[in-house]
Amino acid sequence: MGIFKKISFGLKKTRDTMAVAIDDALSDFDEVNDELFDAVEEILVMADVGVNTAGEIISRVRTLAKKRHYKTPAEVRNLIQEVIEEMLSSDDDTLKLETKPSIILVIGVNGAGKTTTIGKMAALFKSQGKKVIVGAADTFRAAAIEQLEVWTQRAEVDIVKHKEGADPAAVVFDTINAGKSRNDDIIICDTAGRLHNKKNLMDELAKIYKVIDRELPDADREILLVLDATTGQNAVNQAKEFGEVADITGIVLTKLDGTARGGVVLSIKNDLGIPVKFIGVGEQMDDLQPFNAKAFAMGLFGTVPEDYEEDEVPNSTIEETEETVEAEALTEAEEETTDKAETVDIADDTSDNEKLEAEDVSLNEDIENEETEELEESADEEETAQEEKTLSKRELKKLEKEEKKKEKQRLKEEKKAEKENKKNKKK
């Protein structure tokens, strides 16, 4: 598949939104007037082209339409495409990597597609006959090193890595030395993009620049910022913030195939003055394409001039065979199985821990029950002893009463006997 076809396919969602809306708007007019230009400008703004850029496009279109005496909406449509292509064209939209080795630093926030971009770039350069080495200098993001290692294996290029949390500048230093010793053509270094703390990012990049200046003072250097096209104007804001801490030489705009916000390319190029050097138009290894202004403008409007002969993607560019696809599917399946196995292990460990905790709780409950029973038994014994004491007191009192009764009875009988004796003596 040629460059135009790939870019055109990747811009389908943007084309279906922006170009179709422009066509619908133009069809409502029979002549070229201010209302027509206002309607098109509004559509451009809605397509994330940006207010300033949309205004500049329409201003140029107005001027050229008047100069060329255009009278029909169809002529204006072609003029819009022409102005967009002219706006995107630049002499510095290609990488300058003439020295050996040359170095590329890649920055960008998590989730923008930085790791994927590095893997695809490495594959592209390798397909062009270049020797490539990758440095995993994003040592702060969890799993960043492992993910990059997977992509370098797919691209079949070398990687230099340290453990998680290592000094990024040290990784860059080792990667440069490895690249020089192996006579590599291109060194690609992944770096962290922590916008939430600009000072840390600035300090980190300063250390990396210092290493490069010392180890590769005369080497060509590119600093590429990876942006997610699906974020629209937020990508422009990210570029502005990164521009405050890094000398960005180019933009890599990813995920264009998954969004209708492809117009953000115009805003980045026109508002920020930063050239777009790569665009991502798919998930395959060769879907990272060098930016081509003419192909982009044609893809945006779905037009192909008869005299245009597009450059084919080099034959050496990785074209995934059935074996590669099957191998990647197998790898993904294995990774998924591993993830599931790890999940099961974690679940089992959790289950075992819960069982142990349950057993501990049960044991504690048994101990508590035994202690309670002992206390109850002790209480019963005390109660029984108390009852026995109470019973003994009662019995003693009873016996005392009986004794007193008997004593009274005895005294009574004695008195009676004395009376009888006295009577008998009188007789």
Image: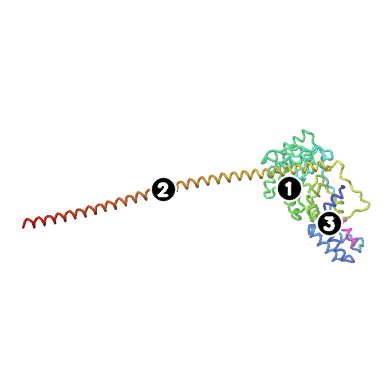
Does residue 203 appear in the picture of this structure? no
The residue located at (71%, 38%) in the rendering is 161
101, above or below 30, in the image: above
Q: Indicate the position of residue 207 as horizontal and vertical percent values.
A: 70, 41
Which is more toward the observer, 131 or 411? 411
- The residue that label 2 is drawn on is 377
342 to the left or right of 45: left
The residue located at (25%, 52%) in the rendering is 399
Q: Amino acid at mark 3?
A: Arg
Queried whether the magenta region covers residue 82, the answer comes back as yes
Q: Indicate the position of residue 389 as horizontal and vertical percent values.
A: 32, 50
Pick the quarter of the image with the C terminus. bottom left
Q: CA distance from mark 3 to mark 1?
A: 27 Å
Q: For the stretch drawn in magenta, what is the main secondary structure?
A: helix
For marks 1 and 2, the one nearer the N-term is 1
Q: Secondary structure at mark 1?
A: loop
- The residue that label 3 is drawn on is 15
Which is more toward the observer, 13 or 23? 13
Look at discs 3 and 2 and give the one toward the viewer.
2
- The residue that label 1 is drawn on is 108
